[in-house]
Amino acid sequence: MNVRPGVAVVVAGESGALAGTVDAWLSEEPARDVVAEASAVVGRDVAEWWRDPLNLSDPVAAHVEVVVSGVAGYRSLAARGLRPVVVAGHGVGEYAALVAAGALPLDQVVELVHWRAELLALSPRPSCAGMSAVVGAGAGDVARAVVADLGGTGTLSVASWDGPAQVLLSGTCEELARAREAVLAAGLDMVRLPGRAACHGPLMEPVARHLAPAFADLEWSVPDVPVVPNAAGRPTRDPDQLARCLRDHLTSPVQWEATCRALTDAGATAVVEIGPVPVLGPLVRQVRPDLPVQLAAGPGAPLPTDRPEPATAGPAPTGGKT
């Protein structure tokens, strides 16, 4: 297959967790190898674990599924000739991007993501805190103003700069309620993301402290292709920089709008989103409306060639969080 040069690959976070996602890839040997290795680490058949939608209400199952499915899809597409110029993941999808690029080994990342999701119990429960999406033109300016007005003495913060028309806030339920009043008064909408922890903000500091020893044990390598870490929004192949950004990942906002710009700066002329539904494609198009985006939900997905298909569209809010 004559895969188009200049392709970027992106992987969503928890919003990309759907029952049976990895099953679509299991006809391919590279994907089966990924699932077998993940199953050995977790101690159960992960593909079977993820076929029950109720299991994915558990962050442990959802987060590990996103990472393993992303890596399985990437390796299957790589076996068909995909050679990206840059990779990125949103939220926990960054872990999949790091494995796909060759910066970290799969077994260590599966164990770390499993532990990370369990530690979310140290943060306030979704009934006490969470995330909401500010949606509409000028979302960034409105979100910045709301946080400046209401967040000075609390924990309200921007969790993700998704794009010009979507910004995520994290904070307590009371803070998010006050923020919603201010957002509505500014003429935009604000949508609560049900069941989500208040990631990428100060409420994650207890989780980050407990994760610190695990980060010290990771075996980093120079990745085959640049990775755009969430905390920086700039591509790099420097393992030390990638490690610093991953340590900051849970408490720093996701710089996804900057990431979308960085994809084209790195030479991307098309984007492949690995996942069951378009989550990041609509966000990429907010920033780079002329950049073709194709969804790869299984090995039969068409890859960008010299004549790419039109970009995939989808509804907001879609951020691939946590």
Image: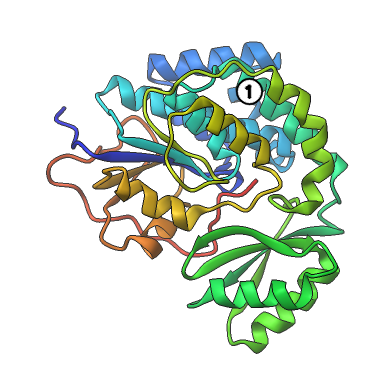
**Residue 224 spot, x, y in % from top left:** 37, 23
**Residue 273 in view:** yes
Task: Describe the colour scheme in one phrase.
Answer: rainbow
Position of 183 relative to 29 (above/below): below
**Residue 172 spot, x, y in % from top left:** 83, 62
Give, as a three-letter code, the residue at label 1: Val
User: Considering depth in this image, is 37 or 92 the residue closer to the camera?
Assistant: 92
Q: Which image quarter: residue 91? A: top right
**Residue 52 in view:** no
Measuring 34% from the left and 29% from the top, which residue is drawn there? 299
Measuring 61% from the left and 23% from the top, which residue is drawn there? 109
Q: Which image quarter: residue 35? A: top right
- Quarter of the image containing the N terminus? top left
User: Considering depth in this image, is 80 or 44 the residue closer to the camera?
Assistant: 80
Measuring 85% from the left and 70% from the top, which residue is drawn there? 174
Measuring 68% from the left and 21% from the top, which residue is drawn there? 111
Position of 279 relative to 227 (above/below): below
- Quarter of the image containing the C terminus? top right
Report the label total: 1
Left or right position of 291 against 54: left
Q: Residues within 10 Å of mark 1 (few under 14, many from 20)?
A: many
**Residue 293 spot, x, y in % from top left:** 31, 50
Q: Which image quarter: residue 116? A: top right
Position of 81 relative to 289 (above/below): above
Classify mark 1: helix, strand or loop: helix
User: Considering depth in this image, is 287 or 258 the residue closer to the camera?
Assistant: 258
**Residue 297 spot, x, y in % from top left:** 40, 38
Left or right position of 44 against 154: left
The residue at which mark 1 appears reads as 110
